[in-house]
Image (tube, coloured by chain):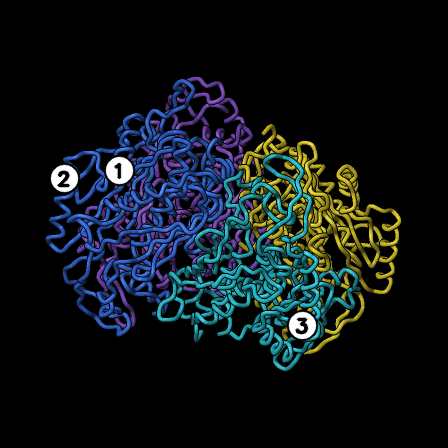
Chain colours: A blue, B purple, C cyan, D yellow
Amino acid sequence: MKNTFGTSVSVTIFGESHGPGIGAVLDGLAPGIPVDEEAIAHRLSLRRPGGTISTSRVEPDRFRIVSGVFGGRTTGTPICILIPNENTRSRDYETTRSLARPGHADYTAYCKYHGYEDYRGGGHFSGRITAALAAAGAIAQSALDGQSIRIGTHIARCAGISDLRFSDLGLTDLESALMSVSKKSFPVLDPNAAEQMRAAIEEAAAEYDSVGGILETAVTGLPAGIGEPWFDSLEGVLSHALFSIPAVKGVEFGGGFALADMRGSTANDSFSVQGEKIITNTNHNGGINGGISNGMPLLFRCAVKPTSSIAREQQTVDFIEHTNQKLRITGRHDPAIVHRAGIVVSSVTALVLCDMLAQRFGTDYLKPGT
Amino acid sequence: MKNTFGTSVSVTIFGESHGPGIGAVLDGLAPGIPVDEEAIAHRLSLRRPGGTISTSRVEPDRFRIVSGVFGGRTTGTPICILIPNENTRSRDYETTRSLARPGHADYTAYCKYHGYEDYRGGGHFSGRITAALAAAGAIAQSALDGQSIRIGTHIARCAGISDLRFSDLGLTDLESALMSVSKKSFPVLDPNAAEQMRAAIEEAAAEYDSVGGILETAVTGLPAGIGEPWFDSLEGVLSHALFSIPAVKGVEFGGGFALADMRGSTANDSFSVQGEKIITNTNHNGGINGGISNGMPLLFRCAVKPTSSIAREQQTVDFIEHTNQKLRITGRHDPAIVHRAGIVVSSVTALVLCDMLAQRFGTDYLKPGT
Amino acid sequence: MKNTFGTSVSVTIFGESHGPGIGAVLDGLAPGIPVDEEAIAHRLSLRRPGGTISTSRVEPDRFRIVSGVFGGRTTGTPICILIPNENTRSRDYETTRSLARPGHADYTAYCKYHGYEDYRGGGHFSGRITAALAAAGAIAQSALDGQSIRIGTHIARCAGISDLRFSDLGLTDLESALMSVSKKSFPVLDPNAAEQMRAAIEEAAAEYDSVGGILETAVTGLPAGIGEPWFDSLEGVLSHALFSIPAVKGVEFGGGFALADMRGSTANDSFSVQGEKIITNTNHNGGINGGISNGMPLLFRCAVKPTSSIAREQQTVDFIEHTNQKLRITGRHDPAIVHRAGIVVSSVTALVLCDMLAQRFGTDYLKPGT
Amino acid sequence: MKNTFGTSVSVTIFGESHGPGIGAVLDGLAPGIPVDEEAIAHRLSLRRPGGTISTSRVEPDRFRIVSGVFGGRTTGTPICILIPNENTRSRDYETTRSLARPGHADYTAYCKYHGYEDYRGGGHFSGRITAALAAAGAIAQSALDGQSIRIGTHIARCAGISDLRFSDLGLTDLESALMSVSKKSFPVLDPNAAEQMRAAIEEAAAEYDSVGGILETAVTGLPAGIGEPWFDSLEGVLSHALFSIPAVKGVEFGGGFALADMRGSTANDSFSVQGEKIITNTNHNGGINGGISNGMPLLFRCAVKPTSSIAREQQTVDFIEHTNQKLRITGRHDPAIVHRAGIVVSSVTALVLCDMLAQRFGTDYLKPGT
């Protein structure tokens, strides 16, 4: 299924950048989960553009829960969340309808949909649809809160500047850090790094250019034994979902690509008994052995490519006329989206974990009092 | 489904390292595809350990096609390939049954299967099951050959030594390189690099240690328009399957993590008209825009962690007794598996592409003469 | 996935009887399919209650297409159709919250959702959600129209009165009959039978009771070769979807249960050459051999149980207090729903066939001009 | 997926009538389930032809468990069961390769597989593949035994002769009846009816003809709350699987088609408190309300058409030459398969229920001691 993901808990997304609205149907979540509209609104605000480093198209994201919530709690039946598009200026896009914006999906959409696609603002390919994932993710996180499973994402790197790393923190510090970044619209641990990143983004914007970055995510509280040996490994299912997020071009777990240069004696995470628990002394495997969680924090990183829309002139083609062309993208765009993508990564992670927990422990597992 | 992957074309795998055998059921492939048992045997030989840099457990991989092939061609119904285990020495494993080998799945398997798991040689988690993927992948590649879709994987990096890069080659050179690496048991483009890598692996082995690496894969001939905007993006589906391969801890497409440090003006692949075709002038997006193939070569890289089994003593736990322990792994192991994993990556890629092409163009698309 | 059905073309439904609204997300349909809002409205009107034989709750079904349609045609991306609930009177239901209405899902919903379910008017179990299927089915039928695939459903039997049978008609008469019943709000071929059925329904209503019936469906124009030998047989997939329709308790193909009393020499449909075509001389197998369409009309019948809500007093339990109780259902209910269910059966059939055709021939097959 | 069914617990089948063998991969079943090879062999013997009313092709069904069982118990990983074909006489089929046997899938297979299909003995369409379902079902039933969930199927009707009905029995008698029929190779409750049925089958055989019948199945011990309101209703999922069984052309739950002629006041099953339990006073809904189990016995019936292979001459076509032909089927065939299909229906039911219980309560639910 093309726009539906998940097995026991699934999410279906729909919408186009400049159509009437976007949304998600979140199905299979346990009944009784508190649905806090303010928490959803907060999550949407973290994804929403703002300030000097974002597009000036700001949608109020006045979402509406159409189904699946009764008396402030999930019923267990599908939750449809609808977010109207209110601030659309379609005329920005029509003149360049058949010019392929480099880095964007205009040309591939044409190959796939034969010209029937809604080409305005990227249509169904627009990053705007991630607002639906963020809203659904807020409810998924509410379910995980009941099991003390915490998720947070920060900008590990942006425009060549690095933040502190989750992987260097002990469990207590990590949990505080997760709490802290989950509230920030520019989620960086080190305030100096944050300031430098912002400056670099503004510099790129001034040069009609854009920057990318790396997001690092950690999850604490996930029990051991989640995931499958082969195709439904925790890495496999998470990466599948994470690559759905526009601009993500790499996903690595634990040491990731750095493991390629390590020796086994370093990369192997040796085990120890710690009171009632079994822990690993390092976490190069990112909390996953053989596709299955081992009880350590889940750790992974996503590479986010620089925003494709830039204001400077670019070489391209008219894919209908089959001619070479120059293109200067006007309209409203972000010099960076890495800071806005953090909450989307956390949301997608929450959705996947709700699904995998429900598959493992049943559909009632996340219900209050279970 | 836990051990089944794919939608229109699917593969189901089964087996344990030390049980009677392993195998795969490949379902949904178009009828009429030539099935060449020698090509399957060759592919299995590329995955099979050999020489001084591999385990001394060598399985002959005398596979048997139980169903789905008639008159040397696929029938269109499920193909069961059975590979018996012949060279098993189970006594190697019994004494260490409850000692978690660091980097392995022993402890997580116990958390998930409560002690009922077949613990001999990693059981169902064993890399041996990838032989079934390689065999199924040989048939999938035969189907792709009919459409001139070529796949190859080489060791881009191993033990700190780098090979040439597919991404630096023009299309003609790339196709020759794919052909060349597909026949090598140690698939490296640059013979000097290959020699250094082998030396480094032997050095690690001599120190009772192991090394990892990075595999780079390219696909040529894939038409534009394959993949979906969101959850079934080409990146999402491929990564899901690739992370199923044991030891893969990172997957990146095109520039991947390096994109995080680029500016948009560099990372964007500008388009040009080239005769009848539309091409991109660079390929930082790895042949994929918005989750959909754009007609350029598909390019991705997998991080392979160093082999977990090393001969030196390691700190670990007895997860049944809940005590700290020392462990020295005996038995037969590889100081590196990155060279053997290459054909598995190519095989998994072939399986995924057959599925995505069949979803896009129908179940007859890969049939001869279509 | 619980509220999503289909593989290449899928539909996701959501909503509760007395919540803000209901709807469907139709995904994967080919791009370029004309979307005629009047056709959708007409189909909704066929399902809508009306006259003396239906509930007095009449919803205007002012649907809104939120996504996936651009310039009056499908884009190929998910189509969200939203139908607000406007005429809800929730107070009818609250006093009987924990009394299990016989024949309804109140008790099983409580077992599954632990009291968090929206109990008003059956909540998510309400037949009202079939309006979303009818709307989505209208678009699916528009896609099938392009391939001259016609679907129609009539009341073969109601309250003991039988209509003529599709299975007795030649192809030309059958196609006219399909056309005719597709426009009727009380879809019966024989006007006398229709009159008697209406009278019987009114009689049951006068006795505070309800009646059921049998729906017969035919499909013409479906090519041979659709369906799979085993689990995705045409019968299997269609029945799966048809049993989703509330009150359907039996599904039979071709001769169905009557085949059990036939001899093979009668039940076997012998083949003949008819010009360019191969036909069967009878159609006891309902157009399906070995799970796969044979080019003859698809024929099947659904048993619809009498409406569960009846006005007379019934014995039941309070499932929270765990006591025996008497219940007299007030509110607005139908003495029969079999006539309203016909369009739902046709709609579900259209959705399933679009999916199976897309799986077989690719996602572009139903696109105009393919 | 074409030959794979199930979500949390799935089964994949493969094989052809005259190929090397057939088999199944059963995946996702809880670890620790006892696997009794004798019980599997017994189940296979119930499906195996025998005596005067069956084909003279008798396969010994010497199955082999290739994976997923360790120490006599399931490991939780995929169980591959392989059943070699030993008694094949392919020459019976070759001369009639392009003659469509009426009632069989020869012609539709040709439409779908374009002549690449293995046409010997029905190939992958052969009823022989149900042996794999019976074997997998034996293990599934072993898992259900741990929860005291009992399944039995008998011939409710054959050649016009009716047996007693499960639906007329009280719970205690029903459980005895289930036990009794599960051991019979000709599963009929009433010995007189059994005798008459056998005589009627022999009579049909003597006239070179065949008969069909109706199978009735009951399940006791299934907890309330299993199933989903819409697409994954218990009826929907069960029927999907049941229609996979060759010759099944109708499925009805509870009163089924007879409900169509009832009034609501009869068809509604009123509720009562019975000690700790809530029961319904009748069971016209077959233990299912709104798609979800209500704790009463599950009751359903399958229509089995008469065996398609009959020895008398039939009219048909040569679908390659496109000519009318006469066909007289030689070889070894059954005048009835309804008695042999009973254990297949029970097996498929066991597989589906294991899946639905695992989805509802988690993958450990059926594990011993849970």
Left or right position of C202 against B120: right
Residue A109's x, y, as percent?
33, 63
Element type at mark 2:
helix
Q: Is residue D63 left or right of residue C63?
A: right
Residue beneath label 3, please? C166
- From the viewer's perspective, is B316 left or right of C339? left
Precedes in sequence: disc 2 or disc 1: 1
Secondary structure type for disc 1: loop
Residue under pointer 2: A195
Q: Chain of mark 3?
A: C
Determine which residue is flagged by label 1: A183
Which residue type carries mark 2?
Glu
Q: Is residue C276 above or below residue B148?
A: below
Between marks 2 and 1 in the image, the one whose residue lies nearer the viewer: 1
Secondary structure under badge 3? helix
Cα separation between marks 1 and 3: 64 Å
In the rendered view, tell whether residue B206 sits above or below residue A25. above
Crowding at label 3, few (<14), some or many (≥20) Cα neighbours within 10 Å?
many
Looking at the picture, which amino acid does disc 3 mark? Phe
Question: What residue occupies the far bottom of the structure in this picture?
Answer: C275
Q: Chain of mark 1?
A: A
Give A326 or C65, whichever is nearer the viewer: C65
